Amino acid sequence: MAREKRDELVETALELFGREGFHATGIDRILAEAGVAKMTLYHHFRSKDELILAALRLRDERFRNDFMRSVERKTEDRTKRLLAIFDVLGELFDSEDFRGCAFINACAEYGDRDSAIHAIAIEHKRLVFGYVRELTQAAGVPEPEPLARQLCLLMEGVIVTAQVSGDADAAAQARTVAELLVHEQSRRES
Amino acid sequence: MAREKRDELVETALELFGREGFHATGIDRILAEAGVAKMTLYHHFRSKDELILAALRLRDERFRNDFMRSVERKTEDRTKRLLAIFDVLGELFDSEDFRGCAFINACAEYGDRDSAIHAIAIEHKRLVFGYVRELTQAAGVPEPEPLARQLCLLMEGVIVTAQVSGDADAAAQARTVAELLVHEQSRRES
DNA sequence: CCTTGGCTATACAGATCTGTATAGTTGATG
DNA sequence: CATCAACTATACAGATCTGTATAGCCAAGG
C-alpha cells in the first residue's frame, strides 16, 4: 500500500513536469491531479526537488528499457541496429505529447552543474551512451567508442530538432548520416 | 536616453535568464541587477513575457552576427567554412558561463508550440539553418539543402552535449563527422 | 479490541511572484 | 523659467509557491 500513493505521485509528477516544465508545475497541481494529500507527499519526499529526482529516475529507467527493447526488436542484425536507433527515435516523435528529452529540459532549468538534478541528467546520458557503445561493439566495428559518440551526437541533435522545430523528419536525416558513418567504419575494417 | 534603461533591462534579463532560467528569474532580481525601477520596466514592456521576447530577439541577432563573423574569419575557403562551424562552436563552449542554447532552453520551459516564446525559437533555428544552407551553397556541393540539414543536426547535438555533459570535446567529434559528410558530397560530385 | 501507520483535510506561515497605483524627482528642451 | 517625459521610490493587491502544524480517519495485524 505504501507504494501506491508514492507511485501515483511520481507518475503524475513526471507527466506534468514533462508537459509544463519543472518550475511552472506547482506541488498543488500535482497533488490535485494525483488525488493525494499534501502531507502524504511530504511523508514520502523531503522536498519538491526530491520528487523531481524520483520522477527523473523513473524516466531514466523507463526510457532506457523501452529504447533498448525497441531497438532490439527492430532487427537481429547487429549492424542494422545502429540505424534502427533512429527509426525508434522517429517513432517517438510521432506521439503528440512528445516534449523533448526530460533530461535536456531539466538541465535547461537547473543549469548549475553541482545540482543533483543536473547530475542525474549527466548520469542518464552516460548510461545511454554506454548502451550505444555496446551496440557498436556488438556490430564489430573497428572503432566502437568514437562511433558511439558520433551516434550520440546525432541522437541529441535529432531529439532537440524534433522538439524545437517539430521536424519529425529529422530522424530520417540522421539515419542517412548514421549509414554513412557505419559504412565508413566497415570500409576501414577491410 | 529612452534606449539606455530599456537596453540595460534587456541586457541584464538576457544574462540572468541564461544563467538561472526563465521561470526561476524573478522580475525583482532583474530590476535590482540592472538598477532600474519597476515602473520603468512596465513602461517599456507590457509583461515579463514581452521582456523575455525582447531578450531572445537580442540574443538571436547577436548570436547570428557573431557566429557568421567568426565562421567567415576562420577561412576564405568555402568548403573549409563548413568545418569551421564546429571550431567556432567549440570555442564557444570554452567560456565558463556557457549555458547551452537560449532557444532550446526556452522551448524546455515554454513547450507549447503556440507560445510566442517557442515561436521565436523556431524562427531562430530557421534563420541559422538558412545561413548554413548559404554556406553549403557557396561551397558548391551537389546537394546543399540535405547537407545543411545534416550539419544543423550535428550542431544541435554538439550544443546540447556540451551543455548537459560538459563535453567540450564534442565539437571535435562533430567536426570529423562533418568532414565525412562534405567529403562524401564532393565524391558524388565527381 | 486496540494499537499503529498510512493517509486525509484544513488551515496557515512565510516567502515570492507579477503587475499596479500614487506621488515625487530629474533633466533636457522649448 | 516652464513644461514634458522618462525615471524613481514606495507601497500594495492578489495570486501562488513550498513546506509545516494539527487533528482525525480508517484499515490491517497482533
Image (cartoon, coloured by chain):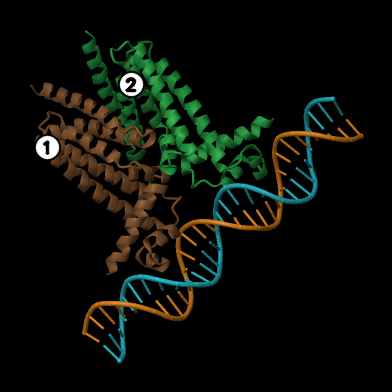
Chain colours: A green, B brown, C orange, D cyan
Which residue is located at x 13 percent, y 35 percent?
B137
Q: Which mark is residue A151?
A: none
If the image is split into quadrants, where does the N terminus of chain A sit?
top right
> Which numbered disc, 2 or 1, marks the residue closer to the eye?
1
Q: In this view of the protein, can residue A37 be seen by the observer?
A: yes
Q: In this view of the protein, can residue B21 be seen by the observer?
A: no
Foreground pick, B99 / B45: B99
Query: Looking at the image, is B23 positioned above or below residue D7?
Result: above
Which residue is located at x 21 percent, y 7 percent?
A190
Query: Where, by quadrant of the figure, is residue B100 drawn?
Result: top left
Left or right, residue B69 beside residue C15: left
Query: What secondary structure is marked by label 1?
Result: loop
Where is residue B16 drawn, in percent x and y? 38, 52
Label 1: which residue? B75
Mark 1: amino acid: Thr
Foreground pick, C10 / B175: B175
Mark 2: amino acid: Ala
